[in-house]
């Protein structure tokens, strides 16, 4: 307990799933955590779980105004930022023959552009604090699959941003790492626009390829996210850590 005492963290996509798990664990370890999501109702529910340490900014991070609001909130309330977790993301499951440009824009605006935008806005804070950036990627960036070209492509971009930024910012004392989850039980399954029976089929198919025999849980990811921003990980930089139940070994 207390490994993040005195730290301030921003976690995007913090109202559910992986982001919620990371926010709760960071707060438990002493950090003041600002969670961000479009769903204000869900954000409020997460904040109730640790009202002393978790606050929120509601909004769509693909919008300029939301990014501005987040930066202004953190500046006024804390005056610093030590940890940025770029977790918010989305996916679509379509063959390339059916993909429209609006599908491309939806995925890349959130998974790539918003991540980039928020990072460069907070860089002065992170450099000043010699802090950490965690980008949540996916094993989809290295284990491609049919009908997931947009998601695989967006996460490939995230991985390369992570490695390049790690090289560039190391001299400033900033570490940049990524986490590549496998299939994880989160709300992303419910926002892909698939019927429930297709979602279940997708989960069953994913589970059949996981050596550990189960789909991941948010806490499987949050524990790694805690380690990477802790003092114990001071010599880890530019890494993309797979948390996939052994899927990457296949």
Image (cartoon, grey):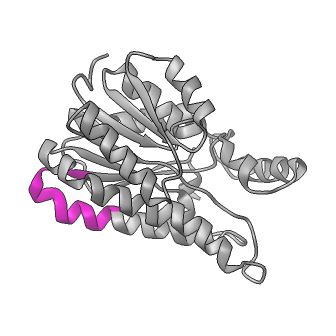
Please report the residue visible at 20 percent of the width from the left and 47 percent of the height from the top. 125
Residue 170 in the magenta stretch? The answer is yes
Relative to the observer, which residue lies in front, 70 or 21? 70
Total marks placed: 0
Which range of residues does the magenta coloring cover? Answer: 162-175
Looking at the rendered image, the quarter that the N terminus falls into is: top left
- Asked if residue 201 can be seen in this view, the reply is yes
Of all residues, the one furthest to the bottom in this rendering is 97
Percent position (x, y) of residue 64?
43, 60
Residue 220 visible here: no
Q: Is residue 136 left or right of residue 187?
A: left
Q: Residue 214, percent across and down?
A: 68, 38
Classify 72 as above or below 163: above
Please tell me which residue is depicted at 50% across the width and 59% down the height of the picture.
Answer: 62
Report the front residue among 13 and 210: 13
Q: Quadrant of residue 11?
A: top left
Q: Is 166 positioned to the left or the right of 21 in the image?
A: left
Image height of 100 relative to 78, above or below: below
Q: Is residue 196 left or right of residue 114?
A: right
Q: Main secondary structure of the magenta part?
A: helix
**Position of 164 compared to 193: left or right?**
left
* Vertical position of residue 4 compared to residue 163: above or below: above
Residue at the farthest left position:
171
Q: Nearer the viewer, residue 200 or 8?
A: 8
How far across and down, in percent of the image, does residue 105 sit?
Answer: 59, 72
Residue 231 is one of the magenta-drawn residues: no
Residue under the image location 45 percent in, 33 percent down? 56
In the picture, the quarter occupied by the C terminus is: bottom right
Q: Please give the name of the residue rendered at 38% of the width and 45% of the height, measured from the top-left corner.
A: 70
Residue 185 picture location, percent across and down: 66, 40
């Amino acid at each position: 307990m207390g490994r993040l005492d005195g730290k301030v963290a921003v976690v995007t996509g913090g109202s559910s799933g992986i982001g919620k798990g990371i926010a709760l664990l960071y707060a438990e370890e002493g950090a003041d955590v600002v969670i961000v999501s479009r769903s204000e109702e869900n954000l409020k529910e997460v904040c109730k779980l640790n009202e002393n340490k978790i606050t929120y900014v509601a909004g769509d991070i693909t919008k300029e105004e939301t990014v501005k609001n987040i930066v202004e909130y953190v500046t006024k309330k804390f005056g610093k930022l030590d940890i940025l977790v770029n977790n918010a993301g989305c996916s679509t499951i379509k063959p390339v023959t059916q993909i429209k440009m609006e599908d491309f824009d939806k995925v890349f605006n959130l998974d790539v552009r918003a991540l980039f935008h928020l990072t460069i806005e907070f860089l002065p804070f992170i450099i000043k604090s010699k802090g950490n950036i965690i980008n949540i990627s996916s094993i989809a960036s290295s284990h491609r699959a049919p009908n997931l070209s947009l998601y695989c492509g967006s996460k490939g971009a995230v991985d390369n941003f992570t490695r390049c930024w790690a090289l560039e910012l190391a001299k400033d004392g900033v570490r940049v790492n990524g986490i590549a989850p496998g299939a994880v039980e989160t709300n992303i399954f419910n926002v892909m626009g698939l019927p429930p029976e297709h979602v279940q089929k997708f989960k069953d198919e994913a589970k059949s390829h996981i050596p550990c025999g189960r789909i991941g849980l948010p806490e499987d990811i949050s524990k790694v996210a805690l380690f990477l921003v802790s003092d114990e990980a001071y010599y880890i930089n530019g890494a993309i850590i797979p948390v996939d139940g052994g899927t990457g070994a296949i």
